[in-house]
Image (cartoon, rainbow, N blue to C red):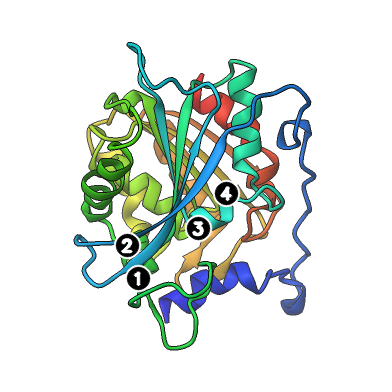
Amino acid sequence: MVLSVTAAAFFLSLSHAQDGKPKPKEYPLGPDSERKEGNPKGTVSKHIWKSKVYEGTIREYYVYVPAQYKTEGEDKAAVMIFQDGHAYIGETGQMRTPIVFDNLIAAGEMPVTIGIFVNPGWFADEIEKPQGWKAPKGVGSNRSLEYDTLDGKYAEFIEKEILAEVGKTYRLTSDPKMRAICGMSSGGICAFTAAWERPDLFQKVLSHIGSFTNIRGGHVYPALVRKTEKKPIRVFLQDGSNDLDNAHGNWPLANQQMAKALEYSGYDYEFIYGEGGHNGNHGGAILPDSLRWLWR
């Protein structure tokens, strides 16, 4: 039930026009989301992972390695984790993250960063078709449990399984200041939860249309941020006035409350509030500037 509400918002391309609300604004991509002649191009590889932390699940994940990555030397690569990796990895979608990384790394506007794009777990023996927002008929998805739960289990999964596996091949930093985590919708609150629970792992958060609502209790975060000792994390939030409003809560209001709580508690944060809906359009349009701010 929870999954049908959160995931359907993407693959049905909600416009809100049917219920009398204004159609969300469309945001164009800028030049940093397009290939630039002469900029080195990173590589992307695809992998399959069967989890022990989330027993019985299987998932795809992608690894982006910039051309500037070095296999030896004193400096190890920065790391950025993406939830719903399929939505961020494509070069023709709303995010186009590999292109943006290539451009910003070449310009010296973010460090040499290995991107790890992780999909949610499915309950299946194998993945017959590439993962997207909706699991095939008869296949259960673990997305909401992994992303919307307010505990440290997902961070543990990333640390002990994904980072450990990718770290066998690439030299990854262990400095939490040089580790970022990102996601949209339930993946956005998941990114915040990972850093909130484990600032020793991640100290940079990028949330697009984050579900800080009562799917699995996420509506408590503004109060927790206000009443908990400040943690060493930097947070970038994006949302739009035409985001979701349903039984779980009001996404625009929830993100505004999060921003105010972060401001009250003295966090290093940025909140960009537009007129978009529950999709990656606005977040993708501002992704280059979001990353510049996050890695500044």
What separation in Å lies between label 4 and label 1 (alpha carbons)? 20 Å
What separation in Å lies between label 3 and label 4 (alpha carbons)? 16 Å
Residue 12's place in the image compared with 22, above or below, is: below
Evaluate whether residue 215 shows in this view.
no
Q: Identify the residue under disc 3.
A: 185
Q: Identify the residue under disc 4.
A: 89
- Mark 2 lies on a secondary structure that is helix
**Residue 123 locus on image (x, y percent):** 33, 76
94 left or right, relative to 156? right
What separation in Å lies between label 3 and label 1 (alpha carbons)? 15 Å
- Mark 1 lies on a secondary structure that is loop
Q: Are marks 4 and 1 in contact (CB under 8 Å)?
A: no
Outermost top residue: 74
Q: Are marks 2 and 4 in contact (CB under 8 Å)?
A: no
Q: Identify the residue under disc 1.
A: 142
Q: Quadrant of the N terminus?
A: bottom left
